[in-house]
Image (cartoon, rainbow, N blue to C red):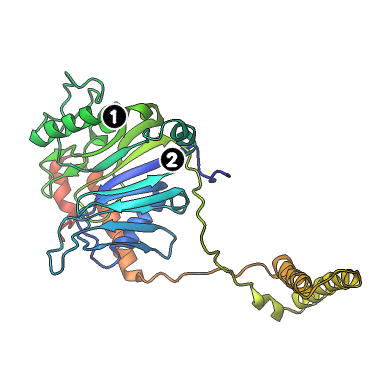
Amino acid sequence: MPLLTTRPTIYLGTWSARTMWETGGVFQIASETRRYNLEVLGISETHRTQVGQQRLTSGELLLYSGHKEENVPYTQGVALMLSKQAQKALIGWESHGPRIIKASFKTKKLQSIVEKCPTKDLTILMRDLNAKVEIDNTEYEDIMGRHGLRERNENGERFANLCAFNKLVIGGIIFPHKRIRKITWTSPDHTTQNQIDHICINKTFRRTTEGVRIKRGADIASDHHLLVAKMKLKLKKHWTMGRTISQKFNTAFLQDTSKLNKFKIVLSNKFQAFHDLLNGEGTTVESNWKGIKEAITSTCHEVLGHKKHHHKEWITVDTLDRIQERRNKKAAINTSRTRAEKPRHKLNTQK
């Protein structure tokens, strides 16, 4: 079974979007996913209802889970955005309400382990948990380091107990980083900053994680920063028995005289070789049809090639300009030396 052409090191992320209902919201998240080379992005606070999946024109696949009832408020909601490579390794996914979504992937390292011990899985837990975890890791040395940001709150206590019970390591407080690289949430008035978004991995696969830090340059009009984990992991393609998608040949090339002449010559040569085989004994109508089909399709492959689909993005140029303008303002805020300078840029994060 061939491996995907992914890098030995892959990147996973988690982000609180605050909403995905605004025009261009999904496109903007997909754009940032490609910009930071993320294979899987966990998204919370999508405010989407129902359960389903959406394939984007740019190739990403969005799996979402929200309230299933009719006429409910657009609150909560979680989603996973998968790159083209991650989609090929997807085994299956499950919705568990508006706060939990689960997806399973096949990996190179997992394969030999799964065959011997099916209960051993690489488990990754990531989202905005509103849990503050302190520097003191007494009694939690196995699942957390000493690089937290603030004192542990009530949610942080429950979160630490959850990780200890399930042997999940909290990635964001294992690796030493500058304080600015740990802050995952900033209040709208820029006075309060916390580390409340987390990425966890089960202890068995602790060594696959090479680093966890935020990406301050990513922007989707949220008060949360994108949190990314760098992992040493290769996804393996999960083969499914499905219907093959037919591809169209680029017949527009036949309008070119040189291409048309080449097509005629190659096809004529293939038919000549096929004609010689027809003179032999034991030929049937079925074998003749297969021979003719093979001659035509192989010539098309060789001379014309497949037609490429160019998807037209529905997002407007004006929206793209506004996205870039917001990104520039956020960069200016991030590089402000004092708190007094931040309000000057007036970055609007209200929905």
Q: Which mark is residue 177?
A: 1
Q: Earlier in the sequence, mark 2 or mark 1?
A: 2
- Residue tagged 2: 10
39 in relation to 250, above or below: above
Type of the residue with mark 1: His
What residue is rendered at 20% in x and 54% in y? Answer: 97
120 on left or right of 260? left
Type of the residue with mark 2: Ile
Q: Nearer the viewer, residue 47 or 88?
A: 88
Dot 2 crowding, Cα within 10 Å, few <14, some 14–19, many 20+: some
Q: Nearer the viewer, residue 90 or 47?
A: 90
Estimate the x, y position of residue 37 in percent, counting from the top left: 42, 47
Q: Quadrant of the N terminus?
A: top right
Tell me the quarter of the picture where residue 276 sits: bottom right
Tell me the quarter of the picture where residue 141 sits: top left
306 in relation to 130, above or below: below
Estimate the x, y position of residue 197 in percent, counting from the top left: 22, 41
What residue is rendered at 17% in x and 30% in y? Answer: 160
Estimate the x, y position of residue 25 in percent, counting from the top left: 28, 62
14 on left or right of 294? left
Q: Quadrant of the C terminus?
A: bottom left
113 in relation to 3, above or below: above
What residue is rendered at 35% in x and 63% in y? Answer: 54
